[in-house]
């Protein structure tokens, strides 16, 4: 979820989420309730607040990635150093050029692996706030392979893509594993059930470097070696 790297792991807790905050989402249906759930989460992000949302890796924290104050709030909620960048998530590859300048090779990589559990480091554009990238020239880009995560991105624009945990704590695979400080700090929790629990692989395609090993790393290494 990250440099763009998110070396953090998210916390274990069995406490339940407050009924006013928890939002259940059935990713297999398009019921009116599902849309209302996403409406509530979208409204929270639009207000500059953070929400917890499921991905194909672990639960993430989503706030408006272009709002420096909202991003600051995510850093504070996680207890994360401002020297460690946070990635952004978009709903599709076609949006990447709005926030980054991929090279031809990076674009081929994006086409090959996204949507998927991969964070790609790409030269950032000025629209992306420095607080997100920790002042670096590259930003981590995610296109989640998860219906709820992409729906949130479609409605809100780019959102932060960082694990829904306190820094240094275990990743949250389910809503019940969210740390109480995270639950109390978000405006809403989109409950998509259990996630796989393996964080994304972070890759610098320009340097052919795996920055963080995670899901699908062997396929990524094979691609980097071949292309």
Image: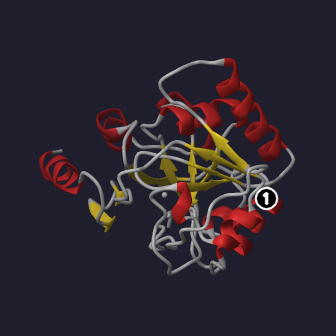
Q: State how the image is colored.
A: secondary structure
Name which quarter of the figure residue 56 lies in.
top left
Q: Nearer the viewer, residue 208 or 91?
A: 91
Q: How many numbered discs sit on the rendered protein?
A: 1
Disc 1 marks which residue? 70
Name which quarter of the figure residue 104 lies in.
top left
Residue 148 in the image: x percent, y percent?
Answer: 55, 35
Q: What's the residue at 47%, 40% (across, down)?
A: 143
* Label 1 neighbour load within 10 Å: few <14, some 14-19, many 20+: many
Q: Nearer the viewer, residue 8 or 59?
A: 59
Residue 19 in the image: x percent, y percent?
Answer: 74, 50
Q: What's the residue at 37%, 41% (across, down)?
A: 116
Residue 196 in the image: x percent, y percent?
Answer: 35, 52
Q: Quadrant of the C terminus?
A: top left
Q: What's the residue at 44%, 73% (across, down)?
A: 7
Q: Secondary structure at mark 1?
A: helix
Q: Nearer the viewer, residue 206 or 11?
A: 11
Q: Is residue 149 left or right of residue 63?
A: left
Q: Work out which residue is located at the far right of the displayed protein and give it.
A: 47
Asked if residue 73 can be seen in this view, the reply is: yes
Name which quarter of the figure residue 76 lies in.
bottom right
Q: What's the residue at 69%, 73% (across, down)?
A: 181
Residue 50 in the image: x percent, y percent?
Answer: 74, 55
Asked if residue 138 can be seen in this view, the reply is: no
């Amino acid at each position: 979820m990250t440099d763009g790297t998110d070396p953090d792991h998210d916390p274990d807790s069995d406490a339940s989420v407050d009924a006013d905050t928890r939002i259940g989402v059935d990713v297999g249906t398009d019921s009116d309730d599902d849309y209302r759930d996403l409406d509530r989460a979208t409204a929270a992000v639009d207000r500059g607040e953070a929400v917890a949302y499921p991905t194909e890796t672990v639960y993430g924290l989503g706030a408006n990635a272009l709002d420096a104050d909202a991003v600051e709030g995510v850093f504070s909620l996680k207890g994360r150093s401002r020297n460690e960048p946070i990635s952004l998530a978009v709903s599709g590859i076609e949006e990447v050029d709005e926030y980054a300048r991929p090279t031809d090779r990076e674009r081929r990589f994006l086409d090959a692996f996204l949507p998927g559990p991969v964070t790609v480091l790409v030269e950032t554009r000025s629209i992306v706030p420095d607080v997100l990238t920790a002042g670096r020239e590259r930003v981590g880009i995610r296109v989640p392979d998860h219906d709820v995560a992409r729906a949130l991105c479609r409605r809100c624009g780019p959102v932060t893509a960082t694990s829904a945990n306190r820094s240094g704590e275990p990743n949250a695979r389910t809503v019940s594993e969210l740390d109480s400080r995270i639950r109390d700090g978000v405006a809403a929790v989109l409950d998509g059930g259990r996630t796989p629990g393996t964080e994304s692989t972070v890759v610098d395609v320009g340097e052919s470097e795996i920055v963080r090993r995670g899901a699908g790393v062997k396929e990524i290494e094979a691609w980097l070696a071949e292309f």
